Amino acid sequence: MNPPDTENIYLPKLAVLDRVVDDIPEVKTFYWRFEDPAAQAAFQHFRPGQFAQISLFGVGEFPASLPPSPTEKETFFTIRQVGSCTAALHELKPGRKFAVRGPYGNGFPMENYQGMNLVFVAGGIGLIPLRSCIVYALEHRAKYGRIQVFYGAKSPGELMYLSDLRAWEKSAGMECHLTVDRAGNSWRGHVGVVGSLFKKPGVEVPVDNTIAFVCGPPVMFRFVIKDLLALGFQETRIVSTLERYMKCGVGKCGHCCIGVAYICVDGPVFTYEQIKKLGEDI
Amino acid sequence: MKARIVASADVLKIVDLLRARGYEVVAPFCGRGRDSYFDTVTDENRPRVRIHLPNPYYPPKRFVFPHIERLMAVRAQNGDLKMEPTYDERPRAIFGIRSCDVAGLWHLDRFYLGRDFRDIYYEKRRKNLFLVNVVCTDPARDIGEDCFCLCADTGPAARDHFDLQLMDLGGGEFMAVAGTAAGEGLFAEPIFHKGTAAHLERRHAILDAVRKRFKTITSWFSATVRYVSQGTIPDKTWEEIGNRCLECGGCTYVCPACTCFTVSDRQVGPGEVERVRIWDSCALSGFTRMAGGFNPRRAVHDRRNRRFFRKLAYYFIQRELDMACVGCGRCAAVCHGDIGMPSVVEMIRRAEPEPAKK
Amino acid sequence: METAGNRIVGAYPSMSHPANQGKICVRGWHVHEVASSPDRLTSPLLRHNGHFQPVSWDEALGFVASRLGQIRDQYGPDTVAFLDSPRCSNEEAYLLQKLARTLIGTNNVDHGAGVYGNNSVNVLLDMIGVPASTNSIGELARSAVIIVDGVDLGRQLPTIGGWVIRARLNGARLIVIDSRRHRVAENADIFLQIKPGSESLLYGALAKVIVDRGLMDLPFVKARCEGCEAFLAGVQDYDLLQAAEGCGVPASLIEAAGLAYGRAPSAAILYSTGIEARDEDSIRGLINLALLTGNLGKEGAGVFPLAEHNNLQGVCDMGMLPDRLPGYQAVTDSKARAALEAVWRAKVPAQPGVGAETLFEAGGRKPLKALWLGRYDPVSTAFFGAPDQVLDRCELVVVQHLFMTDTTDYADVVLPTTAFGEERVTYTSTERRIQIAERVIAPPSGPMPAWEQLTRLARALGAQWNYQSSAEVMQEIGEVIPFYSGASHDNLTRDYGRQWPCTTDRPLGTAMLFADGELERPFKFVPLARPARPFGNPEDFPFTLVFGRSLYYWHQNALIRHSETLKREYRLLLLDYPEGFVEINPDDARRLDIRDGGRIRLTTPSGSLVSTARVTSEVRTGTAFVPYFVRQLKPELLGAMGQSRSLVPVRVEKEGA
């Protein structure tokens, strides 16, 4: 699903930063809205898994996943500071203006998964794009079967969206299993890589009629895919969102092209089967 | 096809006709030695416009997709931001664009105006562009050593996608073919006369003769497309190619069918920023580097591999309805290590294919 | 250059240019971005109370003239120095040294690459009488054998790298000598990946192979050279097997290389005079080889001291050297001085001056009070001494440049210059080709061509300089430098420039030197030193630390910084390794359990340092390579050893857990 044919695909719309909330070190969540309520209303129809382009004029533009579900009231980005553009965003004060274009990308086809079980596997900041799907599914709880979240980070201090995690752990309508690579002092939970959660006592991962969502760093991705295939998942039932250097977000500049796909228009969401067929290693 | 005859003595008057109709006309001029370039026609340089000369190496794609282009200016005023996109909608005519470059523009049309989004900057420039294609008929002057439009099936006479096509028939006459209504509109001018079947015969004869003058007429491309699409080219071949690449980016800059660009913000005054887009090249290492350091195409042979995959893989040919190579030969001309398209096609054909990769 | 209105919006090569034939490097494809960069300086700046204020040209130049005069009179002419970049045009370099010599009275003139390249000038003048490439770049297509010694053509001189690769594809045999396996080395027929610092040993062994196998060009040696006997005596001290061990390459390869070079009907040797410093012995070694085999004065042969900057050759020709006048006569040569004084109608000081390396020494020999820097940014790019400290102690620092740089932080006056495409000036390429750079757009209002600034400054200093155009400056250059006497702007615009000697009776220039057999003086063999004991490392310090200067140089370059794509490309390493890096070979890394990006400790007899490892197969085993911009490594590691050594024995270990 693409945004309506705007006149100038490179022209963003003005947005206002409402408030900033710290998450894990180097990561902040930025609550914002379009200045023009009509633009905000149109934007609200985004799909989980889509992304938008954030403009900090004078510094540059960069892509950012949309972590809120389209059903949530507030729109926000969760951004880690890695380069000059993200650094400029981190310095922006509430009330200041910047600009946004989007939503772009294919997104997760959540309607197609109705009636199925949903298994979410995330590592580190990979939880950011998957959060949108999880919250969306919870908002439409009756339409989906079992919902399981498996999430891991390097250390307890690097687990993201802590308040959401705590709520999901407590929620009766879903399972949420957490793990860390290194425990530290006060961690009482599971220790190990994310894939090890599949074998945690009491965990039973549904395979039939189930979609597995995977998002995380390349190494984690490789191992989790292996684990899921070993559990019996078909390649068409594993979906992920890929990341590449992006400049235009609309399939023209060429930077995000992997093999036959432009990540910004053909993706960023692909099944594992599609990933294997791209024609280039990811 | 709608065709007319125009005397050789009159053919350059087409430039004047277009200028009179309000077009900014760019035409080819000779430089030093074998140099040639497109430049805006003025009263001063009009006598120096040429028809038969080497194809300018700076590709005419820059008239629809400039080397540097301002996308918008952004001004900060009282805490507010004002964005002003800048477009170039000037009516422009390219007089003397070769058939290979016409195919290149069509490829860009399909890329920038098709697919998922329309590029408005490209569209505005392209909409007002009038193309006068000149067929390469003079082996000594028009056709370069590196040309291979025949292999790419784009020349020597373009079949479509021009407004007007001119072909030197010899004997003091040119044939003018209209490709669009706009082109046909010029036929009302007195310099155009009706032709005869004999003219058509001359056209066919000349085209036949010209085709024979190309170095090799091969169907190497079809085999290469197959190998590239199936992923059966040995790694060793890509390494050999990579060893000869000096990462200058020239091949992508001169290619009529290359479309990549980067976008950058620059301060141009107090409180004013411009966002520009600039030609970029997948030949360069930083093209795919992500903030944070991961670079999926760090090695030079991976980038070479990518270039030819994008140019030749069947998937893209299906999407764009054409190879992303028009046979102009510019990449071969500017390459330090002689790994332009013709050489790479030959290397791929000569290599022992490996079993198809999954 | 492609222009639109008054902006340069594109650049593309000339297909017919004899030196590049339309093939240029990535920097060339982006040269148009520099002129249009929004960071251009637009006004002279004068420092008042610590801050720069824009001032008029008259005020700026008037201030500089009066301060220069005061400092010269108060402290003496030798407390003033003038340093140029090897990118400066001929016209501005010529006027700068003329101003220094006649109006201030000092020979303290040098160019930024002098510390690295001037020894090549001296050796070439001594042995063959001409400090420049003896043949033309295009002739490489007709060389039977090409030796590329110690220069990464792919990174530094891609256009020449292309000639070499294409020559090889057409049947030439390519011999690469380098401790690094660079892109062109991957294409070599014979790759001598020698231990750093063993070049002289290698050349001695190569000479021995050629002599022992009867491959000397005896007629050539007899007719055109002197000193051969002493040289041959020295060659006998070399032994192929010992050399192989000392160089760390198989003896069979050395023999094959010697045979190939000796048997070739025409063979060329390329080396670099860029920032990669070579010791004089190794340069003598390769010139001796060319003399031994008669590889001068014929097509496809020759010696190419490659200049890595667009006008390195030119600024040296113009006399931006502390011990040489324009045209390379020695400053101490009274006849040469007298001839120059007659044309300039002013006195020229007789004492040689000091060069940049001495000037920037941390504890300077003679304190420097005033410094003029023409487009030169030593704080960023000088890999020697302590330029920042020296600049700090000066009472007057004047910087001419296009942009603010790290050096302008220390400047009292900043003078904006015009960019490529905005002024009509000449540059001399590495094949002696004097070329005109045309003015294609008007400069933005504010900057002034550097040659014009110097003319006005000279007048402010009381001289009668009346150059109305850069062409007039060039005319005077022709009067002063015999081999430029025919190189008027007029002549230079007719073709693709002219290769010097371009004289009035030879107005088309000279593609190849020494062709006619007419010699002003015989070529000179210089006997080899006795073979150095193979560079053995003490047991505790088994690695050799190499300070790489030219490689990765481009990061700091002001022009690169103002081009979007180039900035991205050349910054990659800085972004991936923000604190710098030390390169080691993967085999060594494996052995030492060091991974790419991991911490690595280097220990020398004098000190130790921790840095980040960059594992690359380009580097020779047993070698650790440090890019020059990691300057803090030098004093920490070298400590009391001082700064003149470029090879240091070192121990390499993985650092920490």
Image: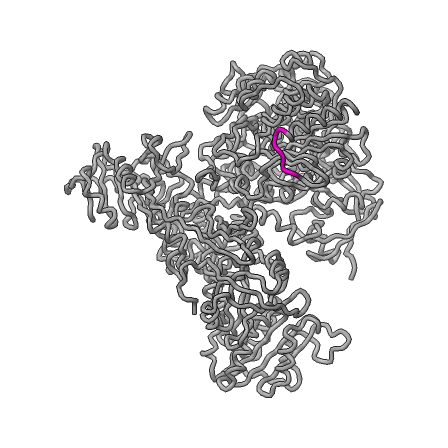
- Asked where in the image residue A198 lies, by quadrant, the reply is bottom right
Expressed as whole percent of the image width and height from the top left, the position of residue B42 reads 35, 34
Q: Is residue C461 toward the left or the right of residue A2 in the image?
A: right
Residue at 50% x, 52% y: name it.
B275
The residues colored magenta run C53-58
- Asked where in the image residue C290 lies, by quadrant, the reply is top right
Looking at this view, is B102 or B261 the one in front? Answer: B261
Q: In which quarter of the image is the C terminus of chain C?
A: bottom right
Expressed as whole percent of the image width and height from the top left, the position of residue B298 reads 58, 54
Looking at this view, is A65 or B357 the one in front? Answer: A65
Expressed as whole percent of the image width and height from the top left, the position of residue C627 reads 69, 45
Q: Is residue B121 toward the left or the right of residue A240 in the image?
A: left
Q: Is residue C399 toward the left or the right of residue B358 in the image?
A: right
Looking at this view, is A25 or C642 the one in front? Answer: A25
The image shows residue C588, relative to residue A147, as above or below, that is above
The image shows residue C302, relative to residue A246, as above or below, that is above
Q: Is residue B172 toward the left or the right of residue B290 in the image?
A: left
Does the stretch in magenta take in A274? no
Figure colour scheme: one colour
- Asked where in the image residue C477 lies, by quadrant, the reply is top right
Expressed as whole percent of the image width and height from the top left, the position of residue B136 reads 31, 40
Q: Can residue A1 be seen in this view?
A: yes
Does the stretch in magenta take in C54? yes
Q: Is residue B355 visible?
A: no
Count of number-bearing discs: 0
Looking at this view, is C335 or B332 the one in front? Answer: C335
The image shows residue B74, relative to residue C156, as above or below, that is below
Residue at 44% x, 44% y: name it.
B254
Task: Find the residue positioned furthest to the front.
Answer: B78
